[in-house]
Image (tube, grey):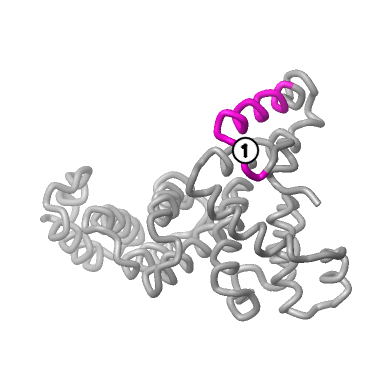
Amino acid sequence: MTNYYDLLGLKRDATGPEIKKAFREKAKRLHPDIAGKTAEEGMRRLLTAYEVLSDRERRFEYDRACFRFIEKVGFDYRSWLREQGNSPDCQAKLVFFELLHLEEDEAIRVWRNNGGIDFHMENYLDREDWMDCLFILAEELGKRLCFYESFRLLVVLVREERRLPYFRHFMEEIETFLRELVRLRLRPQVDDETWLDCMETLLELGFSPRDEARWMRSMAETLLMMGDSASARAVIAGALKRDPALPNTKRLRRELVL
């Protein structure tokens, strides 16, 4: 079975310099400019392994999930899970298992076959495993340009973390991921109504007034394009209360006579 350490040819107690050296040596052989396009998938997996193991917090989370969930298994766990048919319990465990073994495409396929964002894996995994699984899954969906699905999973994570902290200081990275997804990626993939729903969801999560003001500005812009000036006026007024110095509001103020 392959994990990030196996992929880089490292022991579990490898140091930072050892991780960097192993990555560089492997990358030389797998880089598409040298090995051709057939090596692109291998290079992507190598990069993922390096990004996780070279970051102290992410490595800690990976080790906790991987070696608690996997090393206790002394048989072909993947085959056993698959043989259980459509049992949601085993399907949820299979999604997590495939993610931890770098079989991300297969994990996503299983997850979607079981309902995707409507597959409530929290009913079948321990809370820690479920949250780790959702974060890895959100990352992999983002890499495949499936931004709306990634957004929905990140929202669940943030809401659950607010309820009962688990990721703690690592949560800052997850929140940054969510902000960047919204700022740079999500909008072109959703219609106006869905975008408004996404923004309203974000406003329920307890982010900073500055973040909320920017999301409300986007809501006001969308509402104005949809012809709902009254709602746009109310929303931008709320945004300016949160951040009176909110930039890029001149056009809105002018069109809404603020």
Asked if the stretch drawn in magenta spans residue 165, the answer is: no
Q: Where is residue 36 shown, x and y percent of the image?
A: 79, 24
- Residue 12 falls in which quadrant of the image? top right
- Residue 25 falls in which quadrant of the image? top right
Query: Which residue occupies the foreground of this view, 82 or 237?
Result: 82
Dot 1, how many residues are within 10 Å of its Cα: few (below 14), some (14-19), or many (20+)? some
The residue singled out by tag 1 in the image is 14
The amino acid marked with disc number 1 is: Ala
Q: Which residue is drawn at 17% across and 44% down?
A: 250
For the C terminus, give its image quadrant.
bottom left
Residue 77 shown left or right of residue 127 in the figure: right
Q: Where is residue 131 shown, x and y percent of the image?
A: 54, 66
Q: Quick check: 119 above or below 248? A: below
Query: Which residue occupies the foreground of this view, 206 or 168?
Result: 168
Query: Which residue occupies the foreground of this view, 221 or 143?
Result: 143
Q: Which residue lies furthest to the top in this view?
A: 34
Q: Where is residue 41 shown, x and y percent of the image?
A: 75, 38
Q: Count of labels shown?
A: 1
Residue 67 shown left or right of residue 202 in the figure: right
Query: Which residue occupies the foreground of this view, 162 or 218?
Result: 162
Q: What element carries label 1?
A: loop
Q: Kindly report the secondary structure that dominates the magenta region of the rendered protein.
A: helix
Q: Where is residue 256 shown, x and y percent of the image?
A: 17, 56
The magenta region covers: 12-28
Q: Quick check: 2 above or below 138? A: above
Q: Quick check: 148 above or below 22? A: below
- Residue 135 falls in which quadrant of the image? bottom right
Q: Quick check: 163 above or below 249? A: below
Q: Residue at x 38, y 55 (%)?
A: 169
Residue 81 shown left or right of residue 219 in the figure: right
Q: Residue at x 59, y 53 (%)?
A: 62
Asked if the stretch drawn in magenta spans residue 17, the answer is: yes
